[in-house]
Image: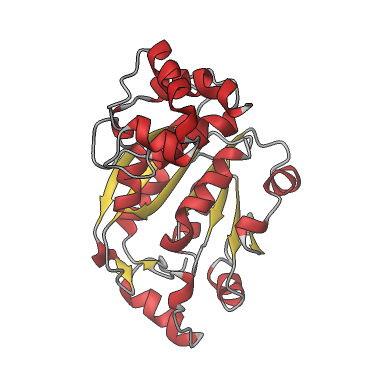
Amino acid sequence: MRKDIATPQYTKSILDKHKFKFKKSLGQNFLIDRNVLDKIVATADVSSETGVIEIGPGIGSLTEQLAKKAKKVTAFEIDQRLIPILEDTLSDYPHVKVIHQDVLEADLKAVIEAEFSGIDDLMVVANLPYYVTTPIILKLLTERLPIRGIVVMIQKEVADRMAAKPGTKDYGSLSIAVQYYAVAKSEIKVPKTVFVPQPNVDSSVISLTLREQAPVHVENENFFFEVVRSSFAQRRKTLLNNLQNNLFSKEQKPMIEGALQETGIDGKRRGETLSIEEFARLSNALLPLNRV
């Protein structure tokens, strides 16, 4: 049995063998700590009945540990240069498939249908490139895929924002967007020293357990998220100011005030103090204004 990929020495020997050079533009940072990988796999609760979608496998360090536990792993890799390396490093695992494609352009429902037929327990597990973390996670959440959840390593600052509660400095429109679709929990802090090359920031593993239904009732989802984004447009401004400057107009101020009064929300508050329930009430009350 070959050595684990996730050691500094073996990672270096793989990179040297294939003369691989890191591309900064692709945010390539490979994990070299087996303990961290074990914690990621355990957090995702991967078993012999689980199908796993991985994004950005790199040279296969996480893929390898997932393959030891999962029924099947399908990984998306954007960098053509890594495809032959993965064929080499994962040759012991016939139940692993690597797709050379940008996951943001992939038809994930079609891939799930083709790759995971007969597998009911599906997870997304990945060490995500920092520069595309948010678009990837929002795609996974908004497409309402038949998955149990998402466990990903991302920049600590972004993980903190996704899991943030109202009234904290990290709480914003991203917190609400993620928490509308999933229960978010920051699981493990990961120092930059366990990567090669070392990134400039620390990371966190976050788990997102998908909700069967949204935690609040909104009349119009797109408008709900517009209200949320507008309320955080200028963090120092009040709710009333942000709404009239970014979503409506000064002429509509009396009507915005009427909606705030109707929902019992003080227009002098800032967006970061509102719970997801308050945003839902407010967007429902403001919706008729949007049709004017």
Q: Quadrant of residue 168?
A: top left
Q: Residue furthest front?
A: 251
Q: In this rendering, does residue 255 appear at all?
A: yes
Q: Is residue 77 left or right of residue 279?
A: right
The residue closer to the viewer here, 69 or 32, is 32
Q: Residue at x 58, y 49 (%)?
A: 53
Side of 202 where 226 appears, left or right: right
Q: Nearer the viewer, residue 6 or 208?
A: 208
Report x, y in % for residue 199.
Answer: 31, 69
**Of 56 and 178, which appears nearest the observer?**
178
Give the side of residue 2 with respect to residue 186, left or right. right
Which of the 4 image quadrants contains residue 171?
top left
Determine the residue positioned at 41% across, 39% down.
Answer: 173
- Quadrant of the frame with the C terminus: top right
Image vertical order of residue 86 relative to residue 111, above or below:
below
Query: Is the residue 203 above or below the residue 149 in the image?
Result: below
Label total for image: 0
Does 290 appear above or below 192? Answer: above
The x and y percentages for residue 272 are: 30, 34
Q: At which x and y percent is residue 289?
A: 56, 24
Q: Is residue 39 visible?
A: no
Q: Position of residue 194 (x, y in %)?
A: 28, 64
- Vertical order, 178 against 89 (above or below): above
The residue drawn where x is 53% and y is 52% is 136
Q: How is the image coloured?
A: secondary structure
The one nearer the camera, 259 or 120, is 259
Q: Give me the residue at 43% from left, 34% from top.
A: 243
